[in-house]
Amino acid sequence: MQQSEQIVVGRIGAVYGVKGWLKVQSFTDDPESIFEYSPWLLSQKTEREMKVVEWRRHNNGLIARLEGISDRDEAARLTGADICITADELPALADDEFYWRDLIGMRVVNTNGYDMGVVEQIMPTASNDVLVVKANSNDGFGKSERLIPFIQSEYVTAVDKEAKQIQVEWPSDF
C-alpha cells in the first residue's frame, strides 16, 4: 500500500503554562480548522502521532493540550514540530479551486503561446496570491523570474490539472 503524501498544516509553538499546553500556529485558511484533523503527525527529528485532547483560543492565537502530555517539560520537547496530515485528509475542491501544492511545478503559458516557465512557489499577499514563475534558462526576454497575480478570469485564464499547465493573460516581456 502506497503511503499518502504528508502536508504541513501548522507548527507547534512555545509551551503555555505548566500543565502541558502548547501554542499552535495554524497554516489553514480558517485557523481553527486545524483541529478538525486527527490525529496529527508531529514531525521534528522523528515523527510521532498525537491526538488533541482539548484546544481553545488564547488572545489572538490558539493553544492545545495533546494526549499523553501533562507537564511543561514533556510539552517543551514538541516545540518547533511541524503538524502534518496526509493528503487524502484534505477536503475535496470544486473544479475551479486548487491547493497551492497542485499548482507548484505547473508550466505557465501566456495566451499568445509563449512558455513563461514553471511555478516555483506561490507567495501570499494582502490582496491576492502571486505565482512565482521561474523562467526558462533560454528565455527570449532575459527574465529569470516572473511574478504573476493569481487572479482567475483576469490574469489566470485557465488551469489544466491534467496537462499541468496554467494559461495566463500576461505579456511575454514583463
Image: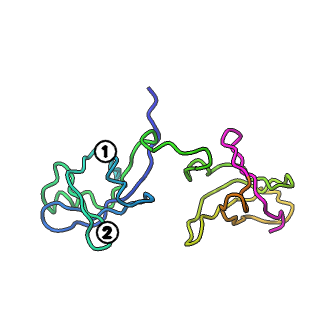
- Image quadrant assignment for residue 142: bottom right
Q: Residue at x 34, y 47 (%)?
A: 37
- Depth order, front residue of 83/112: 112
Dot 2 amino acid type: Gly
- Image quadrant assignment for residue 3: top left
Real-space Cα separation, disc 2 to disc 1, in angstroms? 20 Å
Quadrant where the N terminus is found in the figure: top left
Q: Earlier in the sequence, mark 2 or mark 1?
A: 1
- Depth order, front residue of 85/59: 59
In the depicted structure, whether residue 127 falls above or below residue 80: below
Instruction: Estimate the x, y position of residue 145 in percent, counting from the top left.
Output: 72, 64
Q: Is residue 54 magenta?
A: no
Lateral position of residue 86 relative to residue 42, left or right = right
Q: Residue at x 66, y 62 (%)?
A: 151
Q: Secondary structure at mark 1?
A: loop
Q: Residue at x 77, y 56 (%)?
A: 136
Lateral position of residue 88 relative to residue 108, left or right = left
Q: Which residue is mark 1?
A: 38
Instruction: Estimate the x, y position of residue 17 in percent, counting from the top left.
Output: 16, 68
| Residues at circles 2 and 1 in contact by the CB criterion of under 8 Å | no
Q: Is residue 173 magenta?
A: yes
Instruction: Estimate the x, y position of residue 96 in percent, counting from the top left.
Output: 62, 48
Q: Which residue is mark 2?
A: 61
In the depicted structure, whether residue 74 falls above or below residue 2: below
Q: Secondary structure at mark 2?
A: strand
Q: Residues within 10 Å of mark 1 (few under 14, many from 20)?
A: some
Q: Which residues are magenta?
A: 158-174
Dot 1 amino acid type: Ser
Quadrant where the C terminus is found in the figure: bottom right
Q: Residues within 10 Å of mark 2 (few under 14, many from 20)?
A: few
Lateral position of residue 55 relative to residue 11, left or right = left
